[in-house]
Amino acid sequence: MRQNVDLIETVGLCQYSQKIVKFSDDFQFTVKRKLWTHNIYKTKGEFEITKITEVCDNGVTREIEYDKASAEFSSSNIRPSTFKFYITANIKMKEMCVAGHHLQINCARFQCLKLCHFFKGDFSLHGYDSLKFTYYVKKIKADFSEGNDIEIDIVNPYDVEILGKKGDYKIKHNSSKRFDLYLTFSFYPDILDKLPSFDDENFSKEVLSKENYEPPISNETCSLLSKIFESAKHSSNNESRPESVVSQIPLNDSVPKFFKLGPHLRYSDVYFIASDKTKVPSHRCILAEFSETFVKIFDEASEIPVHIFAENFNAETIQSALNYLYGKTDAVYGKEVNVLKFAITFRIQHLINVCVSTCEELISVTNVCEFIQIAYANNFEELKQKCLKVLIENKEDINPAKIAEIPKNILYDAFFFKL
């Protein structure tokens, strides 16, 4: 694909001098001046000179006639002059991939770190699951009162552009505040072709040599996963609910470790449609184990794959919730409220319990007004009592505008609440 693009460049020339007029690496020419005549030669790239202007002594800009046949033009005087060259270049358009990731880290996690300690996390780009980034959160000062005491370092092994810059991305932060930053990643599509294959022998040796190598999934788990995917594949030919095999793993405080499988595209037979119309894939046989709401949706579906419209949630929230169900236990960090709302909508009780438990630990003057309304709307009794306590003990520190948004029945309970 090619496109005509207008480019402009300004140069100053004196008598018997020459300069290279460079518009880009692909488009340039040399202009040589005698007394008042000028000649253009050594052109590079496919372009057309559409206009040349000269700034006169009195500051007035005038257009100069350019002879395309001889590639010459003349100045109005013999003194040094400033010229502006206008060209239209025929440029080959290059495809770019642009993805985003909303990185959020709750301040409660920062406060668990001591000086010179760190924790790490990772994330994959939505739509480009093979691009996985690891980030390190490091405590670099003893106390946040001394300034930014946290450094967040995102390792960039693919040398893509993060917020317009190549290399690792580093930023300093104050641990008293929640970290909330939307990151953009831009790269050429061919970078995906350069990624090593998991079947490549050299790649396997490289992975095995790394300090943080995790052992492969056990044979028992692989056998179970094989049954799950075989069930999903078989069930795509009929409208019945797929036979459950996930129930062979107890659902107490843990969830099946299926996230190690990588991208969830293989054998996917259900898609969530996010608020921006993005499709987020998953598997019926797994979702059905976590919620009877999904069971009902699948039983009533008339075709495969099933489409579930979740227009109140963005793709990142949906993916975070699914990642947790697939075993990535840190997937909801910093997204607890939105994931909780998603879990409530689809009655995913296991995920509701996890998010509510986390919210109970994160209650503060900045979020108590939102948390207490969620607690009352869904009858989360323990969260409700903890929010009432924080509300009463810190009423002087809470934004009055936020208090005004709280329903009267909640304020009535707060008024009669006994500490």
Image: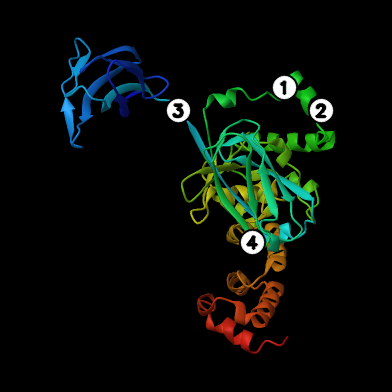
Mark 2 or 3 closer to N-term? Answer: 3
> On the picture, is 30 further left or further right than 307?
left
> On the picture, is 152 further left or further right than 280?
right
- Front-most of 299 and 169? 169
Mark 4 or 2 closer to N-term? Answer: 4
Dot 3: what SS? Answer: loop
- What separation in Å lies between label 1 and label 4 (alpha carbons)? 43 Å
Please say if 55 is above or below 110: above
Mark 2 burial class by Cα count in 10 Å: few <14, some 14-19, many 20+:
few
Query: Which is closer to the viewer, label 4 or label 2?
Result: 4
- State which quadrant residue 76 falls in: top left
Q: Amino acid at mark 1?
A: Asp
- What separation in Å lies between label 4 and label 3 (alpha carbons)? 38 Å
Are discs 3 and 1 less than 8 Å apart at CB? no
- Front-most of 365 and 8? 8
Q: Amino acid at mark 4?
A: Lys
Question: Which residue in the structure is indicated by mark 4?
Answer: 177
Mark 3 or 1 closer to N-term? Answer: 3
- What separation in Å lies between label 2 and label 3 (alpha carbons)? 35 Å
Question: Which residue in the structure is indicated by mark 3?
Answer: 95
Mark 1 or 4 closer to N-term? Answer: 4
Are discs 4 and 3 less than 8 Å apart at CB? no
Residue depicted at x 59% and y 87%: 412
